[in-house]
Amino acid sequence: MSAKLLELAERRAMLVSRAAAQRAELAQALSPWCGPLAVVDQGVSALRYLWRQPVLLAGVVVCAAVLRPRRVIGWLRSGWLVWRAALAVKRRLSG
């Protein structure tokens, strides 16, 4: 094997080793976030499902409004505050 190929093989091995160490370090640093991010991911999936099922969403809203109007009003207030906060965070993160 030529000296250049040997040098490239050594460099590749060193880079692969460094990348593996960095992946392990990153996984360890992000491990506390696995639970909260899984909950957020499930919430986003649920919202996407509801967005694709507008009849189901409308039915849930109508049932909730008929059964407990005061509670629904409270949920709407809370939901509105959460929606505004999420938009504010999104704007800050996007620049």
Image: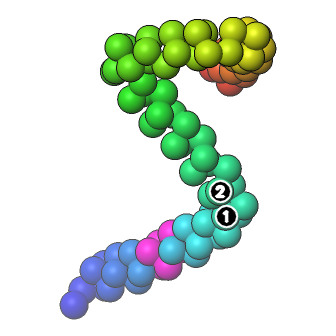
Residue 35: image tag: 2
Q: From the viewer's perspective, is 38 left or right of 54?
A: right
Task: Answer whether residue 70 is visible to the viewer in this image.
Answer: yes
User: Is 70 in front, or is 38?
Assistant: 70
Q: Is residue 4 above or below residue 63?
A: below
Residue 48 at x, y percent in the picture: 42, 27
Q: Quadrant of the image for the C terminus?
A: top right
User: Is 51 in front, or is 37?
Assistant: 51
Circle 2: element type:
helix
- Seen at 60% across and 41% down, the residue is 40
Q: Quadrant of residue 26?
A: bottom right
Q: From the viewer's perspective, is 64 left or right of 84?
A: left
- Seen at 44% across and 74% down, the residue is 16
What residue would you read off at disc 1?
31
Residue 74 at x, y percent in the picture: 77, 14
Residue 51 at x, y percent in the picture: 40, 19
Circle 1: element type:
helix
